Amino acid sequence: MERKHTKTVRIGNRTIGGGRPVLIQSMTNTHTEDIEATVAQINRLAAAGCDIIRSTVPSMEAARAFGEIKKRIAIPIVADIHFDYRLAIAAMENGADKIRINPGNIGAKERVKAVVDVAKERGVPIRVGVNSGSLEKELLEKYGGVTAQGLVESALNQVKVIEDMGYDNLVISIKSSDVLMCVRTHELIARQTAHPLHVGITEAGTVKSGNIKSALGLGLILYQGIGDTIRVSLTGDPLEEVKSAKLILKTLGLRQGVAEVVSCPTCGRTKIDLISLANQVEDMVSDISMDIKVAVMGCVVNGPGEAREADIGIAGGCGEGLLIKSGEIIKKLPEAELLPALREELLAMQSGAAPQKKETAMAPGAAPQERKAAMAPDAAPQEDKE
């Protein structure tokens, strides 16, 4: 897809904009003052694929904690500021790589300027954040409520305040819990600014509903080439946000080095605990940094055929299953050994070395009749009419 060309902005050791890859953000849910817990969570998120992390700064103690947190993490950290301009300044003085503010919430222009002056001095980018819950009263009256046009006008007004102070090292974030309004908002603002855009559906909900809303909203926005960083906002473990964001980007062809799991729906032919198996495989491949497709199939009737387009996969039988690689059945194993064997093969693929093969279900040049026997020792193969 053709990406919208935005300005480049340096955030710590990462750069966004200018057609660079879309980066994943998440936010800690620890108390920032608890340095040990915050560092541990950030490092877990970074290991899962998070590129930039945001932490709230509700107190001076939290702002000062940034200094120690920065020493122990490898990804940029953004300070989330809501009202007190002094906390924004303190966070930058303690190493924040970016700050998130809504200038309208900071108060007098002198306070906003004090923040901008320190950001300018230290080269810290400012993310101007506006959401549907913070729309100004005059814009609500002008547009008859919360609208995409009102959100865009609000964001551009806030951006102009900072630009008029001589600073344009900015990122814009406009969010709404209304998916279609959020999509429309980004379509409008992308035509009116070259600043990088941070994209997300705010207050999307639980892991279940939030993932659906985020996939739809982010998919529609990103597919138009809009967006430089994203966050999947979920009521749950931030680790789920990172996993979902990676999959959304992978599905749109915007992120490499992500293993994709495909699995079949259950049916009456299933004789293996497919649901548990598929979930375990999805967790297992989360640290596999390869562009591969991993198939998890529920039966040996159609499983091998359906897994043919995958790089590697498993197909379950009655208490046993097949390990399939590049369309070839390479092992028949008891059910309990399927996951370890799959993991072994995946790690070998990642390292570029092939593990020593155990006894295979059939010779590579086996005749079709032998292949069918290996696929379904407990039932005659059938064509799936679905």
Image (spheres, grey):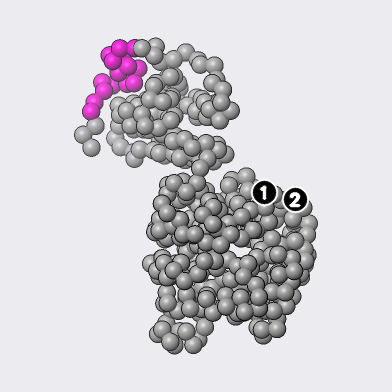
Q: Which residue is mark 1?
A: 43
Relative to 293, is 17 on the left or the right? right
Point 42% across, 74% down: residue: 148
Q: Is residue 346 visible?
A: yes
Q: Residues within 10 Å of mark 1 (few under 14, many from 20)?
A: some
**Label ID, residue 93:** none
- Give the residue type that dot 1 points to: Asn
* 2 and 1 marks in contact (CB < 8 Å): yes
Q: Which residue is mark 2?
A: 72
Point 56% across, 30% down: residue: 350
Comes first in the chain, label 2 or label 1: 1
Q: Secondary structure at mark 1?
A: helix
Q: Residues within 10 Å of mark 2 (few under 14, many from 20)?
A: some
Given residues 203 and 145, the one toward you in this image is: 145
- Span shown in magenta: 366-383
Q: Is residue 40 visible?
A: no
- Give the residue type that dot 2 points to: Arg
Examine the structure image and report whether residue 127 is included in the region drawn in magenta: no
